[in-house]
Image (cartoon, rainbow, N blue to C red):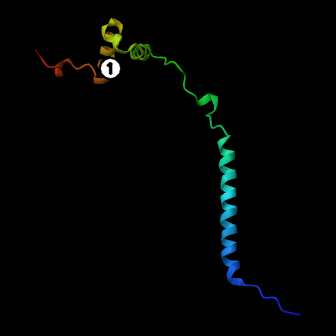
Amino acid sequence: MRARFVNWGCVGPATIYLGVAIGLVAGAITLERRAHHTWAPPPENRLSAMPDDALTRDLIRCNSLGSKAENDQSCIAAWAENRRRFFGDHPDKAPKP
């Protein structure tokens, strides 16, 4: 009877290829499972759709008007109030004509 010998030179690369193949399959399964999972914050952490501040509501409305807001008096007043709140009311620093 003949003795059988294993060519160990082929076993090393074969195990590496097998490990890479198992890693690719595991990664594909993980990505597939994540694709179907929805990541939404809990309902108590969601922001309200409309702000509580009347000025902010006016600014949002003016933004939705587009170029028509340039002639709207309430938008002009809202922008002036927004600038006043942002920059502060400092009449001594205002340029004099």
Image x and y of residue 7, in percent: 72, 84
Query: In front here: 21 or 5?
Result: 5
* Location of residue 44 (image quadrant): top right
Helix, strand or loop for disc 1: helix
Mark 1, Cα crowd under 10 Å, few <14 / some 14-19 / many 20+, is few
Furthest-top residue in this view: 73
Position of 23 relative to 45 (above/below): below
* View extreme (bottom): residue: 1
On the image, the x and y values in percent for residue 97 come to 10, 14
Q: Residue at x 59, y 30 (%)?
A: 45
Q: Which residue lies furthest to the left in this view?
A: 97
| In this rendering, position of residue 52 left or right of residue 19 | left
Residue 29 position, x and y percent, is: 70, 51
Determine whether, in the image, residue 55 is placed left or right of residue 43.
left
Q: What residue type is labelled 1?
A: Arg
Q: Which of 49 and 3 is in front in this view?
A: 3
The residue located at (35%, 7%) in the rendering is 74
**Residue drawn at point x = 66 percent, y = 59 percent:** 24
The residue singled out by tag 1 in the image is 85
Q: Position of residue 82 (x, y in %)?
A: 33, 18
Q: Residue furthest front?
A: 1
